[in-house]
Image (cartoon, grey):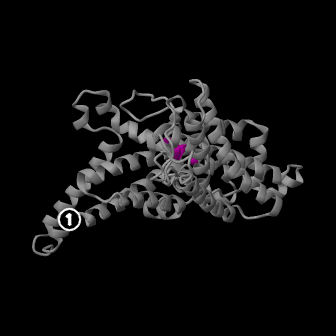
Amino acid sequence: MSPASTATATGRVSAWSRVRGSNVLVTVLAFVVAMVIGSVLIAVADTDTQAASKYFFAYPWDTFTAAGRAVVDGYRALFEGAIFNPNTAAQGTLAGILGPISETLVNATPLILGGLGVGLAFRAGLFNIGGQGQVVLGAVFAGYVGFAWHLPVGLHLLVGILAGILGGALWGGLTGWLKARTGAHEVITTIMLNYVAVYLLGFLLSVKGFQRPPYGQAISNVVDDNARLPHLLGGDLRLHAGLIIALLAAYGMHWLLTRSTLGFQLRAVGANQFAARTAGMSVERSYVVVMLLSGGLFGLAGVSQILGTNSAITGDIDAGIGFDAITVALLGRGKAGGIVWAGLLFGALHAGGVQMQASTGTPIDLVVVIQSLIVLFIAAPALVRAIFRMRTTGGGVGQQLAKGWNG
């Protein structure tokens, strides 16, 4: 073999080795493993498979056939509900063609914003699990402006968005202030503030002026049309401009962390607060600032919920976004681009799960199980590498969390 051929072959081997050792491949394989385990769960939950398993030793093929049909039908329904449904597309309408992808993007929008909030706090070494309360406060502030104030078109929406950001930022900033002034652990304070926000919302939904007449149900007044986020694909599809806000926020987070002095300080504090303090950085100020920004991003998720997806505030306006955002941030490894893709994936799973349950009877809880398995395998890269016999490299999610994901 000539030296040139040897060098080419060596380069190919080296490139393949880098691919095998990359975190991106581990993430993909973790998703694959989670889907395989999900297939087993779908088959176990299928009634036809259960019936065939009763005579498994007499006719085992019936069980395998029923299980295979259940898995194929389940994942086909998941795809049709999240990406493209040929049955509705045959109608030839925009809603029929783009309906599934629209629902995926609607579900992904608040998850991206919430994931950015969690990921940004991670970068400064903080664990913000108060997203539920911050989403609620963002929705309350934005919703109140939306139905109680009557402003011109354009201005009303802008003020509503700013109010939502303010609500989330105040709730997140309170945690940062407590951390900076008293050393109170952010996990404890955010959990407690979640309860405060939820019960505060319950109280507001019983107060006249906030509650919708005739005051018999726990639901707020309806947001004015002037304060609604515009639909991107027409009134028949729910996709709204919150998606644009989420993508802009992702770019803003990337720019902040990679191009700005403030972002450098936040990453320095997350990597080693003692070294950052020695270098003259204010660790306490960084805690307050990053929690204000993180809460503001969750507030935007609340804005997306009340000014985009819904038209009135209810007790479940947070829709579990605060906690789902943690898994999105983990899957995205705390990076803006990764969080966007993770949000889209989870949005697809949410949208497709509804279709899967409606079409096949598969419990939607299985989608939650698949999401949890994905995060589990992402958090345990050594397990994925062992399953696929990949070479080991340092730096799992746990280690990245400890370092504030500043690598």
The residue under label 1 is which amino acid type?
Thr
Horizontal and vertical percent position of residue 137: 61, 49
Q: Specify whether 189 is left or right of 11.
A: right
**Residue placed under numbered mark 1 in the picture:** 47
Give the magenta-colored segment's residue range. Answer: 109-114
Crowdedness near tag 1: few (<14), some (14–19) or many (≥20) residues, C-alpha within 10 Å: some
Q: Specify whether 71 is left or right of 353.
A: left
Does residue 81 appear in the picture of this structure?
A: yes
- Residue at (56%, 35%) from the top-left corner? 247
- Residue at (61%, 59%) from the top-left corner? 194
Query: Secondary structure of the magenta portion, mostly?
Result: helix
**Front residue of 359 and 79:** 359
Does residue 389 appear in the picture of this structure?
A: no
Q: Quadrant of residue 206?
A: bottom right
Q: Residue 238: say if magenta.
A: no
Horizontal and vertical percent position of residue 356: 29, 51
**Front residue of 253 and 319:** 319
- Residue lying at the far front of the rendered structure: 214
> With respect to residue 304, does 288 lie above or below?
below
